[in-house]
Image: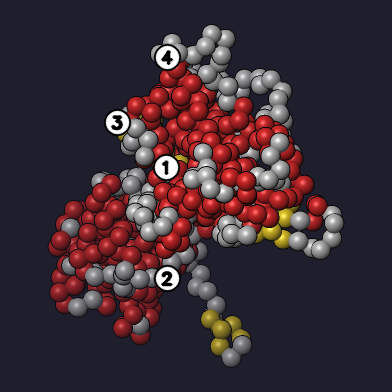
Amino acid sequence: MIAIQATASGGHAVAASEAAVYQQLLIDFTRRELRKSDRENRAVEAPPEPMVNAELWRLGIAAYGMFNRGRQFVSEVQLQKDLETLDPEGLSAQDDRPGLVQPLSEARRTIGRFFFIHTSETGEPDRSRKTYEFLHATFAEYLIAHHAVDRTRELIDLYEDYVDGRLRPGVAWDKDEVLYALLSHRPIADGAIVRFLRQIIDKLQPQVRTSGGKVLEMLLSKVDRHRILSKETDYNPHSRTTVQRLAAYVINLVLLRLLLDPHRSITLTDLAPAGQEPLAWWRSVVRLMQAGLEEAAWLGVLHAIEPVVSDGAYCLGLRRDGFAHDMQEVYEARLLFDRAAADVAHVGVALWRGTPVPAAASPVQLYSDVLARRLFAAPSPASAPLLLEAIRRIGPLRPPVSFAVVEYVLTHCGHLSRDDTAELVAAAVTSAAEAVRAVPVIIARPRLLEVLPHIGDWYGQRFPSAADFARVAGAFALLNLIGSAQDKDLGWPVYKLLMRTNAGLASMVRSDVIKKYASVSAVADDTRSSLLPAIVDALTHELIRLEEDPTPLPVRTAGRPVR
């Protein structure tokens, strides 16, 4: 594209930005086309700027005709109608100069001889079957961005004239019918269009951007006002309802307002109309957009706008990070600045879709991340550093987050390093309840009793629940049979203390049952740490069952029960 522009401009300096390249390219080829079409004045130097701008406006109408219909092409009949609606004066002027660019067919055929518009013909006289499309979508995307800014500039100029007292009495500066006609059909949140908007707006003077921000804020404050029926407001190429058009127009005004800000950020207080509570106003706007936009367009909005709370202020910015489509409900809640709903959505997508949160920034996000990894991800030590990083960032854990981390450790204890296990247990086990659940990890790695002595203290207390006692006492009795000499030395004092403290429940620990599960552990010696959580669960279940019903379960031999 840069090479084409350099050729078209006679080898002069090439524009720096992508938007500038397309602008100069379209201007150069439009001038050339106008000069070729005006056969009587072939010797005239460059065509006047108003004529070039008029042709670019017609190209823009074609681009918006495709975009607002959600297509890559527009039929001749549709484009004719759009031109009659949005550029009636331009067509009348062309009718008076038959040698110049013709109203539609001749104009598009002439431009089609170049490269940016392709004419598709069927060989039939039916004009509705003749279509026009840009050979590359980027031309349309640039024209959409260019004319969105250009029409906004017209309002900015009128506003500045009004402020300076130069505007003729009786002339309204805020007649936004043309801007409304263009931008009330689909959000211009597409990445390529936003990129062009950025580059074009960055070339504006600071004063213009400041005035533009005020203009857009005032347009937003009365966006739902009744508009007098006109050709511009009657432009509705896709037959959208009033709610759909209002939703699209609102988001497009918000996007333009964000882009005009040098920091690409604005508070709801600055954006909301005077006299309205900013958060309540914004939530009504979000619900309007969600109700009025098609699903793909709504996803585009979620992808483009990032809600941020900074120093207690609700702010909107342009999204810089990635967008995960399977977390749509989370983004929707965030856009409403509804933290409670976002927390629920986080947990929901973790449980339902198994979506982890790679950079958890709150306890609920950490909880969701652990749930997703616990329920859906294969055991892997690679996830531990990410989890530990999030824990360090978030701080002390409390239920249910702490229990979720305990479950993670139980699932992964056979794969985790000693240091990672110690840090995870230290973070998650903050009460006796978590210590009871985590006891298989302690049995698998008894040296944790040295590193984290307070856990042994919890095991030595009186247990109000027989089930909790059976789990802890059974696990330590198992350690006394399967552990190394050093492991037994660490576990034996804890076992003696908990048996003495809970003497009334000591009969639950049956040596025959403990020996049975010790033999199972011995068989699985190489994978013992991975299997111990399941072994301890099964052991606990049997000790509790035998306490309630001491009758042993039947043992099947050769198909016959033996008691």
Q: Count neighbours of disc 4 (C-alpha within 10 A) and say few if under 14, some if 14 to 19, many if 20 or more.
A: few
Going from N to C along the chain, the mark reached first, 1 or 3, is: 1
Identify residue for label 3. Answer: 311
Disc 2 marks which amino acid? Answer: Ala
Q: Distance between the residues labelled 2 and 1?
A: 48 Å
Q: How far apart are marks 3 and 4 (CA)?
A: 34 Å
Residue for point 63% across, 60% down? 113
Relative vertical location of residue 95 with respect to residue 376 in this rendering, above or below: above
Q: Count neighbours of disc 3 (C-alpha within 10 A) and say few if under 14, some if 14 to 19, many if 20 or more.
A: few
Disc 4 marks which amino acid? Answer: Val
Q: Nearer the viewer, residue 355 or 459?
A: 355
Q: What element carries label 2?
A: loop
Closest to the camera, between mark 3 and mark 2, is 3
Q: Are marks 1 and 4 in contact (CB under 8 Å)?
A: no
Quadrant placement of the C terminus: bottom right
Is 487 placed left or right of 206 in the picture? left
Disc 1 marks which amino acid? Answer: Ile
Q: Residue 200 carries which label?
A: 1
Q: Distance between the residues labelled 1 and 3?
A: 31 Å
On the image, the x and y values in percent for residue 41 come to: 58, 45
**Can the viewer see residue 95?**
yes
On the image, the x and y values in percent for residue 227 come to: 66, 21
On the image, the x and y values in percent for residue 432 come to: 29, 50
Colour mapping? secondary structure
Going from N to C along the chain, the mark reached first, 3 or 4, is: 4
Identify residue for label 4. Answer: 163
Q: Is mark 4 on a helix, strand or loop?
A: helix
Going from N to C along the chain, the mark reached first, 3 or 2, is: 3
Residue for point 26% across, 77% down? 481
Q: What element carries label 3?
A: loop
- Looking at the rendered structure, the number of numbered marks drawn on it comes to 4
Going from N to C along the chain, the mark reached first, 2 or 1, is: 1
